[in-house]
Image (cartoon, grey):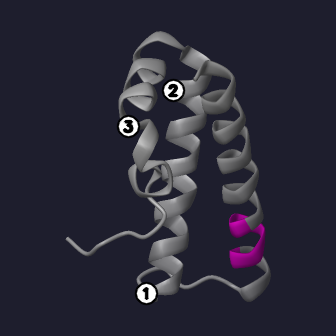
Amino acid sequence: MSHTPHELAEEFPEAAELIHKLKVEDAHFARLMDEYHEVNRAIHRAETLVEPVSEQHEAEMRRTRMTLKDEIARILKAAA
């Protein structure tokens, strides 16, 4: 399996334990994580041409990933 950049563990290495705790205890956080991973993997498949998409669609996916990451970061900061 190839390396997928932008995994949450890489984006927030200092918060690994908190991420796990919130994923188990907070359904909203868990849903955000699932959405983030789904979009992130779709972007990776598009970048590697496994599932090519239009440039516009890839840009939309990147914006969605950034929005999800910002919300995850906000929750992590509030929970720390």
* Magenta-highlighted residues: 58-62
Quadrant where the image shows the N terminus: bottom left
Nearest to viewer (mark 3 / mark 2): 3
Relative horizontal placement of residue 32, taking residue 44 as reference (left or right):
right
Q: For residue 26, which numbered disc appears in the image?
A: none
Relative horizontal placement of residue 62, taking residue 7 as reference (left or right):
right
Question: Counting other residues with Cα less than 10 Å from the Cα at mark 2, is it few (<14), some (14-19), or many (20 or more)?
Answer: some
Q: Residue at x 51, y 26 (%)?
A: 30
Quadrant where the image shows the C terminus: top right
With respect to residue 31, does 54 lie above or below?
below
Q: How many marks?
A: 3
Q: Amino acid at mark 2?
A: Ala
Our reading of the magenta stretch's main secondary structure is helix
**Mark 1 or 2, nearer chain start:** 2
Under tag 2, what secondary structure?
helix
With respect to residue 37, does 17 lie above or below?
above
Q: Amino acid at mark 1?
A: Thr
- The one nearer the camera, 7 or 54, is 7
**Mark 3 or 2, nearer chain start:** 3
With respect to residue 71, does 56 lie above or below?
below
Q: Quadrant of residue 21?
A: top left
Residue bearing the label numbered 2: 30
Residue 57 in picture, x, y percent from top left: 74, 75
Residue bearing the label numbered 3: 16
Question: Counting other residues with Cα less than 10 Å from the Cα at mark 1, is it few (<14), some (14-19), or many (20 or more)?
Answer: few
Mark 1–mark 3 CB contact (< 8 Å)? no
Q: For residue 48, which numbered disc appears in the image?
A: 1
